[in-house]
């Protein structure tokens, strides 16, 4: 229950504090006095979008604070506990808006977010705006109203989840098919690339080894001459290195004859002779292998030219080209794998479709059962609102050309029909309902949905559009009955409704110098009678208007309304 509301520097409201009571609270006042601004302030507390334009001229920021009394076992406790917000039986919400557009939100003095307010709002307050009856003209809203009446949120969620999964998998399948079609258009070229690389019979590091072989073949003569010359220097020619080592050996003998301590030099000489002889042997073998083969050189050059040509397409080295061949073969085999995945996905989609239809079918049956109850109860409520012979019906459309009813909300399409007068056929609300009739249908639905909903406070902002006289008085009676289950706050211009309120507030606009501001206060019994007279008589209040106002007040206190026809 909303117990108090404080508003600072919001629109034309400078500073305003108001306490509300359990039961039926009525707000009245001249047009433009600021009554609907109060509703706008409450919307801020519920997480509505804020704008710096809402800030009163000359002020740096605007603020709204609401205090709510929570009933035992209140439903928002789970959210508060999850967010770590301490609460017993009272909830204090504060929200401020600065010129920069920055929002500050506090729940029980703990910094919070607008998103958290939006999660709490349906559990606290429900607002029915002065133009809300227009949404009844949109058949797309009727199904959600029926679901809310029947408490089918869990069933709707299951259907929506299956539909979204079915839709996501269908989109995935469509993408796979598009990719495969693109792949098929490239397949011929892909096969050519694979064949070109395979026919080259590439070997790992082949290009490096061929380049080395080409260098050897090109320089065969020089290599042969150098190796032979080295052999001659070491061994073959007169005075070769190995031959002169004998002279070194004789010199060492002379040294050892005098100084035996240098016997280690002999070992050095022996190792040197062995190493040089090994070198001579290796050089002879190397020289024998060197062959100048013009035909082999031509073959190597031709092979390297082929590798260079392929390298421009597939990679700068033989190893890179071999890796490219592996990738191309994998791509070539992807088509077959894609077909298998498509078949598997199609089976999954069929399974999801079947599950969706089963779940949506169960939801549809529940909806049709609830539609009968809703139709009967709305018709009954309309009788209490001076439409005694009106008939209301929630009609299902069973036409299914090209599956138009396969949707996130299920397989049903519902439209509300009304016959306001005897002898008239049931027709869509958009074709037959007047503004006053729509207001009463909306009130009947609100009354029914309030039994199912969770909000403790219901705010009606001039939902009495298009009605007056007897019908207005019956609306007042229904709002009074609704206040037995909920706190009701109603903004109205009709005295026939205001007289049934338990608490009556008046909103006034005042000009002080160059500024205008709104104020609100609760009326005494005498002031209330005068306010009803103003609502009846306008600018000039006659004695008859005052008498009528007193009569309305007495009737409202007794709960007596217009006698039903």
Image (cartoon, rainbow, N blue to C red):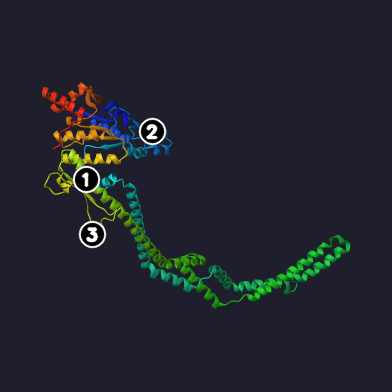
Q: Residue 45 is drawn in which quadrant? A: top left
Location of residue 485 in the rendering, given as x and y in whole percent from the top left corner: 28, 35
Question: Could you tell me which residue is drawn at 42 percent across and 68 percent down?
Answer: 332
Q: CA distance from mark 1 to mark 2?
A: 42 Å
- Which one is earlier in the sequence, the residue at label 3 or at label 2? 2
- Dot 1: element: helix
Tell me if mark 2 has few (under 14), some (14-19) or many (20+) residues whose alpha carbon lies within 10 angstroms of its own. Answer: many
Location of residue 369 in the rendering, given as x and y in whole percent from the top left corner: 26, 50
- Which one is earlier in the sequence, the residue at label 1 or at label 2? 2
Query: 63 or 310, which is in the foreground?
Result: 63
Question: Could you tell me which residue is drawn at 84 percent across and 61 percent down?
Answer: 262
- Dot 3: element: loop
Location of residue 100 in the rendering, given as x and y in whole percent from the top left corner: 34, 34
Looking at the picture, does residue 99 appear above or below residue 414? above
Query: 404 or 327, which is in the foreground?
Result: 404
Q: CA distance from mark 3 to mark 1?
A: 30 Å
**Can you tell which mark lies on residue 401?**
3
- Quarter of the C terminus within the rendering: top left
Residue named by callout 2: 107
- Quarter of the N terminus within the rendering: top left
- Dot 2: element: strand
Query: 241 or 320, which is in the foreground?
Result: 320
Left or right: 190, with 479 as reference point: right
Q: Residue 345 is drawn in which quadrant? A: bottom left
**Can you tell which mark lies on residue 376?**
1
Location of residue 22 in the rendering, given as x and y in whole percent from the top left corner: 29, 30
- Which one is earlier in the sequence, the residue at label 3 or at label 1? 1
| Whether residue 376 can be seen here | yes
Q: CA distance from mark 3 to mark 2?
A: 51 Å
């Amino acid at each position: 229950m909303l117990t108090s509301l404080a508003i600072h520097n919001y629109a034309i409201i400078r500073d305003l504090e108001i306490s509300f009571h359990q039961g039926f609270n009525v707000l009245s006042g001249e047009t433009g006095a600021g009554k609907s601004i109060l509703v706008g302030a409450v919307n801020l507390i519920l997480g509505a979008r804020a704008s710096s334009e809402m800030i009163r001229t000359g002020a740096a920021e605007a603020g709204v604070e609401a205090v709510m009394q929570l009933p035992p076992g209140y439903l928002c406790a789970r959210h508060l506990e999850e967010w770590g917000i301490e609460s017993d039986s009272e909830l204090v919400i504060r929200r401020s808006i600065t010129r920069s557009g920055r929002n500050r939100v506090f729940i029980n003095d703990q910094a919070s977010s607008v998103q958290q307010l939006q999660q709490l709002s349906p559990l606290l307050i429900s607002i029915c705006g002065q133009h809300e009856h227009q949404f009844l003209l949109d058949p797309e809203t009727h199904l959600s109203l029926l679901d809310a009446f029947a408490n089918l949120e869990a069933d709707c969620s299951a259907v929506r989840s299956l539909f979204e999964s079915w839709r996501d998998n269908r989109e995935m399948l469509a993408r796979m098919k598009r990719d495969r079609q693109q792949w098929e258009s490239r397949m011929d070229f892909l096969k050519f690339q694979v064949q070109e690389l395979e026919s080259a019979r590439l070997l790992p590091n082949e290009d490096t080894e061929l380049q080395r072989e080409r260098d050897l073949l090109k320089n065969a003569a020089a290599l042969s001459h150098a190796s032979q010359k080295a052999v001659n220097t070491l061994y073959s020619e007169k005075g070769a290195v190995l031959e002169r080592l004998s002279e070194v050996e004789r010199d060492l003998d002379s040294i050892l004859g005098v100084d035996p301590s240098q016997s280690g030099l002999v070992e050095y000489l022996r190792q040197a002779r062995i190493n040089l002889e090994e070198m001579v042997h290796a050089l002879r073998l190397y020289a024998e292998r060197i062959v100048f083969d013009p035909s082999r050189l031509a073959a190597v050059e031709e092979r390297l030219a082929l590798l260079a040509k392929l390298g421009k397409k597939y990679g700068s080295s033989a190893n890179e080209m071999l890796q490219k061949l592996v990738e191309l073969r994998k791509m070539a085999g992807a088509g077959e794998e894609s077909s298998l995945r498509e078949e598997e996905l199609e089976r999954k989609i069929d399974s999801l479709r079947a599950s969706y239809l089963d779940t949506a079918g169960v939801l549809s049956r529940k909806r049709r059962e609830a539609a009968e109850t809703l139709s009967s109860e709305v018709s009954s409520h309309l009788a209490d609102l001076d439409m005694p012979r009106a008939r209301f019906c929630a009609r299902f459309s069973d036409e299914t050309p090209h599956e138009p009813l396969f949707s996130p909300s299920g397989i049903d399409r519902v439209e509300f029909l009304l016959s306001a007068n005897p002898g008239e056929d049931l027709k869509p609300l958009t074709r037959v309902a007047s503004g006053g009739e729509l207001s009463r249908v909306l009130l009947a639905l609100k009354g029914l949905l309030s039994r199912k909903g969770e909000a403790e406070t219901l705010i009606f902002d001039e939902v009495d559009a298009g009605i007056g006289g007897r019908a207005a008085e019956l609306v007042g009676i229904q709002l009074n009955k609704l206040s037995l289950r909920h706190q009701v706050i109603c903004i109205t211009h009709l005295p026939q409704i205001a007289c049934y309120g338990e608490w009556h507030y008046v909103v006034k606009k005042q000009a002080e110098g160059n500024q205008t501001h709104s104020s609100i206060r609760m009326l005494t019994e005498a002031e209330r009678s005068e306010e009803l007279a103003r609502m009846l008589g306008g600018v000039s209040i006659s004695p008859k208007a005052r008498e009528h106002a007193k009569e309305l007040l007495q009737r409202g206190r007794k709960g007596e309304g217009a006698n039903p026809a």
